[in-house]
Image (cartoon, rainbow, N blue to C red):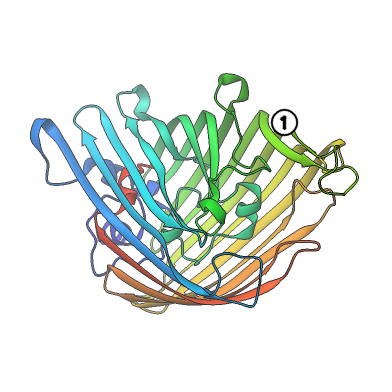
Amino acid sequence: MRFRLLLLALLPGAAAPLSAQQTFSEPDLSWLDRAASLSQPLGSGGAGGLQWEWGAVLDVIGEWSEVDSLERINEVRPRSVALHGAARLEDFGRAFALVDFSGSGDGSDLILREAGGWLDLLPWNANLRFGKYFADVGAWNRTQLSEFPSPNLDGMRRDFFGGNLAVTGVELHQGFDFGGDGFRWSVGIANDMEGQDPDTVGNGVADRADGRNHFGQDGVDTWLGTARVEFGWNNNDNQMTLGASMVYAPDEIWYTYVNPDRILGNADDRSVRDEVRDFMAGIDFRYFKQLGPEQWHAATVEIWGKKNQYRMTSGPFDTRAGLGAWGMYELGFDQDWSGGYLLSYWETSHYDIEDEGSYNGIFLNRNIGPEHRIRVFFNHTNPGFARQKYYIGGIQYTFRFGAPRRSALLW
């Protein structure tokens, strides 16, 4: 019982109220305690068997640097003002939604990040997720930036996925419990996708000429498939997961600005629409250990491979393979203080030359009760060949109110 209560306090996904012991920085191992999560009602109830809850998150950040290529630098901005809600429908499943008023430095946008539901009326303890949601790929994709232990997403996922990979489709899940250990799998199909990153222009979802957001992807002929398997182990004060994921788009719509003679404004300049094949596969490992009544540490590693078709800006069509990896370690000194380090590396994609990039940073967190967090950080980014490298230092304040978003996740 003591171990179960500890999981409910520390791990995302458990439908438990916020408590003084719950920290902001947490490994995403909640599905190991899925039975407790599903058996607990969302809230105090309502008419007609509808049980609901809601919450809000405010994320304010200031970043300072000498770099001259970023809109968000040298100002304090409300990066996210998010309102989320979830409802349990008796004998049916759950519905959830998240709306975010997000500012990336070039103005603010009202973004629907998630809106969908879970269908529980399936045999063999399976669940079907449908609507718009963060795809079940990788170790941390379902964790939003305001919940992420590091102040910024790792550079590898920003390049490969555009940030958090959000899709519109359906996703089938099934899990098995083996006396505290577990195994689960999921497969999904979607007809639309977008990369969500509040640190980029347009929050990562604006229409851009490079086709990152898949213009016109609105039918079954441009479908996207995802799959994931994950094993989890509980051993006293240790929790571990090992997972593998896949993303496959056989006809991903991509726009490329072609300029064969490298002279802007000539007659040969044009935007070319292609349907390209994109395949990514990755493995991930997460580890969490309680070191004492208030001390803990956590580590995660993800490695991804990518093989994609693309059109060079000079005109020819090509296929390229690349690798990316990122890792993070965090140490909790007590329930109020924690610190960590994140390192990421990737081979850049959709460029005319083969190149690599890196992002790494250090951060220190101070939790002021269960609702408030202040963070200071310092990081370095190398975006690739012929692009400016830069350091950034900053401070971040996060406030959350009401129920956690994670109670709508199930997995």
At x 54%, y 69%, the residue is 329
Image: 71 above or below 67: above
Q: Residue 326's x, y, as percent?
A: 63, 60
Image: 181 above or below 123: below
Q: Residue 278's x, y, as percent?
A: 70, 35
Q: Residue 394's x, y, as percent?
A: 51, 76
Residue 37 appears left or right of 179? left
Image quadrant where residue 39 sits: top left
For the N terminus, the quadrant is bottom left
| Residue matched to label 1 | 273
Q: Residue 17's x, y, as percent?
A: 22, 57
At x 17%, y 46%, the residue is 43
Image: 336 above or below 42: below
Residue 383 appears left or right of 312? left
Q: In the depicted view, which residue is nearer to us: 351 or 228?
A: 351
Q: In the depicted view, which residue is nearer to us: 181 or 109?
A: 109
Please, which residue is most extreme toward the right here? 261
Q: In the depicted view, which residue is nearer to us: 254 or 295?
A: 254
